[in-house]
Structure formats: C-alpha cells, structure tokens
Image (cartoon, coloured by chain):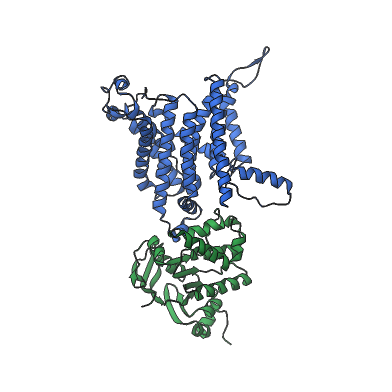
Chain colours: A blue, B green
C-alpha cells in the first residue's frame, strides 16, 4: 500500500513538472498575444475559485452563492496593499492619495486577501450558516451584492477608491504564475478534503442528523468549510485582479458567481478534477473557440446566416443545455481523474462483464 | 449508581407533548429495551439523551454526571452513541469512510485501526465491501454498517433505534445475535424495538411506553409473560 502511495506521488509530481515545462516552452515559442495564454491564465484562476466553491457545494452540501463577493474582497485587499506608494496619488486622485500609505510584498498581500475574505466569511457565516439549502443560497447571494455596493460607497473612498478603478498594482506576465498559485491552493484543498475534516464535511453533506449523532459539531464544521472556501476565493480574486490589471467592484456581479456555479455543475459537483477541467473548457468556449460565431462571415458573396454579434451566447447556452440533459452529473460526476482510473478503464475494456464501477482517485 | 438514569423527562414538539415525564434506569452491562407502539415517544427519548432534541424538563444522568444540557459532541465523548432509526449511513462515503467517521472524536490512530479490524471480525461482509459506497449496500449490510460505525466510537452505552426495521427475518436474527455479542464484550445496550418478542428475549429488563409515558417495567421474562403486553405487542390474543 505504501509502495503504491509512493509511486502515485512520483507520477503526480512528474506530471505537474511536465505541465509546467510544457507551459514554459510554449511561452518561449508562441507569441504572447495568443488566445491560448488568455485561456490558460483565466482558466487557472477560475479553476481555483471553482474548486473552492465545490468544497462548499459539492463536499459540504452548502449551497452558497457568495463566491463573487469573496473574490471582490480578495481583489480589493490585494490591490489596496500593493499599489506602490508613489502611484497612490494618481490612483486615489479624488481622495488625496488615500489613507493606506504603505505597500506589502505580493506574497503577503495574497495572505492578506485570504485572511480578509476569510474574516468576512466568518462574520457572515455566524448568522447565515444556520439556514438551509435555498435560503442559504439567497442569503449568501444577498451578502455578495451588499459587499459589492459597500465597496463602492463614497465614504470608504480613502480605502477603496469609491467606485473608481484601482490600478498600477503589480501584475503577472507569465502563465506560470497563476498556475503555480492555483495549483498550490488546490493541492491544499485536496489535502483538506482527504483529511478527517474532509470526511466530516462529506458526512454532513450526506446526512446532517446522522453526522450530528456521531458527534460532529455541525455549525463548527460548516463555518470552517465556509471560511476556508471564501479565503481561497479571495486568493483567486487577487489573481483575477492581477490578470485584469485593474479592479472595480462593479465587475463582480452575481453573474460571475453563476459562471463559477456553471463550471462546478458541468465539471461534476463533488469532483475537484472535474471543476479544473470544466473551468478551462468554459473559459476556452466563452473566450476563444466560439468567437467565430460573433463575426459576420461571408463565403464568396453568400453571408452565412445567423452569425453576428451575440450569436456565440445562443450557441453556448444550447451547448450547456445539451450537457445538462445528457451529462446531468457533470463531466466527471463525483469521480476524480487519476492515473488509476485511466488504467482501470483500459483494464475494464479487456474484461467485459465486470459491471461494478470502481471509484478512482484513491 | 446506574449507568444511565432518566428522571421525569419531558419533551415538547411545538405544543405537542411527546414525552410527559418519563423515568427509567439502565445499569452497566445490561441490555434494556423500550417497547411500545408508534408515537409512544421511544425515538424521542433516545434523541433527547443524545441532545439532538432539547428536553423541556427533567434530567438525564450518565454515570452520575448531568448530561441534560450538554452538547452532542461531549455526550459522544463520554461514551454514549446512537444507531439512528432507518440506519442513516452516509450513502456517498465508502464503508471504510463511514467507519472512520464513527471514530471522529478519537485521536488514537493505532487503536482506531484495531477497532476497524474488530468491526470487520464482527461483520465480515463489511470487510469484503470496504471500498464500496454505503448507499450501494443492502438493507441488512447498511444496518451492520450503522452498528459498526457506532462501535467505532468505543461506546460504553450503545443505543439502537429499531435495528430490525425493514429487514428479512434471517437478517434480524443475525442482528440480534450481534447485539448480544456486543453486550457480552462489555457494552451496555439500550434497545428500542417494535419487534417486542425478539427484543424482550435478549433483554435483561424492559420498559413499555405508551403515548409519552412509561406504563410498565420488568425483566424481559416478566414482560414476555405479561398478559397485557402479550395482547398489545406480541400479537397473541386472549383465549
């Protein structure tokens, strides 16, 4: 058993190294404006927030829709504490340079983003985590909207710059940066899910009453999952701020939460690898592969019908509907992609009649 | 001093008195059974002992300590555990994960592994299926898992809410012989049953509950032979 764990570890480590090397080489040989890099950067960021949402919705059974709000908090925390002091006058032009007159290193700002988002989650969680299912979703969605309005409040201008943009903070160029940050964060979430805490989360999802009878403190564990999920959403918000190079509260609409929810559902509620896979597919479809549908196209003198601005979204919606109809548990269901499951699949091909689907990812 | 002592326990469900002041005792090492019809308040009794339902009056003592207002976690830590009605295993967790959840409040890793082996020795079927999701098990296997999961908490008092519900007679027989075995190993058992006949046969003592009150008490044998009990719960009519 230990030997197997060891080989698994070596295989995953070499796989990760391989991916990073491929990305590194791709960046060297391809023009940096290529859409592929846009997709990879945004995909990595969305993968993190999708996994954090999956921790709540998929593993703890808490249907929360506050993700965009916590991303906003993370993005703002990061931006506020990293804008260089000399640039503050220009950024906070209506607020005399703002009241925060120091900067912290990027790494520290990331930790702060997680901490502040986690703190907000803790406070919000105290009242709302006593609610169940739909009511929890409505309450968290409401809080996300309140946070969005709150950050645009003029009285907070010296800190948040009101409804104006925050900019001139450090950003990243290489696609490796979001990959490594997201990768590390997702790895932490996976470790958490496989720990005894993760087992308790799943028990709460499966049957609250039985979990309580086993001595699992429901509220404490729900609060924990909520805070951790929100902290990682905060980090992905900080990454998103870096990716966009500017931050404005107005952009963190509930539509963003729905996008993330869509990724979680398409990937499979309760599947980490599903969420990662789906986030890249989602970003690729919405930003890249379906772009051609938005352009009016002529073949000779004949204009291809329907192709015009906005048609992409129509096709995209239809694809999603088809997905939900035929893969109603998402691409991965609750399974995980792993080397084991691939080799298992190959073995099964050779052994027809073995009907039991063994769960991968162990 | 009895292991579990219940005095004048009252529970209200939104105006309806589910328990109207009951009292009974469980001595260490016994099998005690509560029998009674649906709605007599048997499950409510167990739930209020676990503090899943808050009592409106009365008190519950476990080994001399008042646990009436203690939270569930602390009660489990004291060594009281419930096998809930309808099994309630975690369907999307594997059998092994279900067992591990049972030991959630324990930190002694080596001892937990040993107890997993012990549960497997009681229920070999669980070992065969340890990687399977609990939801895919048969009813009897799920009941075994629910009992095994409770044993993982290393309880001194195990409370079972209708373990024979919806199971085939042969499986019921298995379950009852396991209950006896658990008791022989030194665990005190408080058993709720509709299957009064089987329950009274293995019980040292029994209590009969009716609409929120304890109406009769005695040894298992006494109750089995009691005319009123026979008529009401054992399905034997007067000649």
On screen, A343 above or below A113? Answer: below
On screen, A259 above or below B32? Answer: above
Residue A41, given in percent of the width and then of the height, sits at 50, 28
Residue A211, given in percent of the width and then of the height, sits at 46, 57
The structure residue drawn at horizontal position 35% and vertical position 71%, both measured from the top left corner, is B61
Closer to us: A27 or A62: A27
What quarter of the picture does the C terminus of chain B occupy?
A: bottom right
- As drawn, is B192 to the left or to the right of A354? left
Residue A321, given in percent of the width and then of the height, sits at 59, 36
The structure residue drawn at horizontal position 54% and vertical position 81%, both measured from the top left corner, is B231
Which residue in the rendered view is the most extreme toward the top?
Answer: A301
On screen, A205 above or below B69? Answer: above
Closer to us: A240 or A86: A86
Residue A223, given in percent of the width and then of the height, sits at 39, 48
Q: How many marks?
A: 0
On screen, B40 above or below A16? Answer: below
Q: Tell me, yes or no, if residue A45 can be seen here.
A: no
Closer to us: A174 or A35: A174
Closer to us: A307 or A29: A29
What quarter of the picture does the N terminus of chain B occupy?
A: bottom left
Instruction: State the image quarter where residue A250 is shown.
Output: top left
- As drawn, is A354 to the left or to the right of B8? right
The structure residue drawn at horizontal position 57% and vertical position 21%, both measured from the top left corner, is A294
Q: Tell me, yes or no, if residue A81 can be seen here.
A: yes
């Amino acid at each position: 058993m230990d030997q197997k764990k060891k080989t698994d570890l070596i295989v995953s480590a070499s796989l990760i190294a391989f991916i990073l090397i491929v990305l590194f080489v791709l960046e060297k040989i391809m023009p940096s404006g290529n859409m592929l890099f846009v997709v990879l950067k945004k995909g990595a960021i969305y993968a993190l927030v999708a996994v954090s949402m999956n921790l709540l919705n998929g593993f703890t059974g808490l249907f929360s829709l506050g993700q965009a709000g916590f991303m906003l908090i993370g993005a703002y925390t990061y931006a506020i504490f990293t804008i260089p002091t000399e640039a503050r006058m220009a950024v906070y032009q209506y607020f005399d340079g703002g009241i925060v007159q120091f900067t912290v290193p990027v790494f520290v700002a990331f930790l702060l983003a997680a901490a502040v988002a986690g703190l907000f989650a803790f406070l919000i969680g105290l009242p709302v985590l006593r609610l169940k299912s739909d009511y929890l979703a409505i309450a968290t969605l409401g809080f996300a909207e309140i946070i969005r309005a709150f950050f645009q409040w003029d009285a907070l201008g010296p800190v948040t710059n009101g409804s104006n943009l925050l900019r001139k903070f450090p950003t990243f160029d290489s696609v490796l940066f979001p990959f490594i940050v997201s990768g590390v964060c997702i790895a932490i979430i996976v470790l958490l899910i496989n720990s005894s805490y993760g087992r308790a989360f799943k028990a709460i999802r499966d049957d609250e009453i039985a979990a309580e009878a086993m001595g699992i403190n429901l509220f404490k564990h729900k609060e924990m999952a909520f805070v951790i999920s929100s902290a990682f959403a905060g980090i992905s918000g900080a990454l998103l701020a870096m990716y966009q190079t500017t931050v404005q509260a107005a952009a963190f609409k509930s539509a963003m939460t729905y996008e993330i929810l869509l990724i979680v559902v398409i990937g499979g509620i309760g599947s980490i690898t599903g969420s990662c896979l789906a986030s890249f597919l989602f970003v690729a479809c919405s930003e890249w592969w379906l772009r051609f549908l938005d352009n009016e196209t002529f073949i000779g003198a004949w204009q291809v019908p329907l192709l015009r601005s906005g048609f992409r979204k129509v096709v995209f919606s239809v694809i999603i509907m088809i997905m939900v109809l035929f893969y109603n548990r998402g691409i991965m269901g609750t399974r995980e992609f792993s080397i084991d499951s691939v080799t298992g699949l190959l073995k099964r091909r050779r052994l027809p009649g073995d009907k039991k689907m063994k769960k991968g990812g162990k | 001093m009895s292991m579990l002592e219940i005095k004048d326990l009252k529970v209200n469900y939104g105006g309806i008195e589910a328990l109207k002041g009951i009292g009974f005792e469980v001595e260490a090492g016994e099998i005690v059974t509560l029998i009674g019809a649906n709605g007599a308040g048997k499950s409510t009794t167990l739930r209020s002992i676990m503090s899943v339902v808050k009592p409106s009056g009365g008190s519950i003592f476990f080994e001399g300590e008042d646990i009436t207002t203690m939270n569930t976690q602390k009660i489990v830590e004291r060594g009281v555990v419930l096998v809930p009605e309808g099994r309630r295993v975690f369907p999307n967790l594997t059998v092994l994960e279900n067992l591990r959840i049972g030991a959630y409040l324990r930190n002694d890793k080596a001892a937990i592994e040993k107890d997993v082996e012990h549960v497997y020795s009681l229920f070999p079927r669980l070992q065969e299926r340890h990687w399977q999701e609990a939801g895919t098990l048969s009813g009897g296997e799920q009941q075994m898992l629910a009992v095994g999961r409770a044993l993982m908490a290393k309880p001194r008092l195990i409370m079972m809410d209708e373990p024979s519900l919806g199971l085939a007679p042969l499986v019921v027989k298995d379950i009852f012989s396991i209950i006896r075995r658990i008791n022989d190993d030194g665990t005190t058992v408080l058993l709720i049953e509709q299957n009064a006949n089987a329950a009274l046969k293995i019980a040292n003592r029994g209590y009969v509950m009716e609409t929120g009150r304890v109406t009769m008490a005695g040894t298992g044998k006494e109750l089995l032979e009691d005319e009123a009990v026979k008529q009401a719960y054992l399905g034997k009519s007067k000649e």
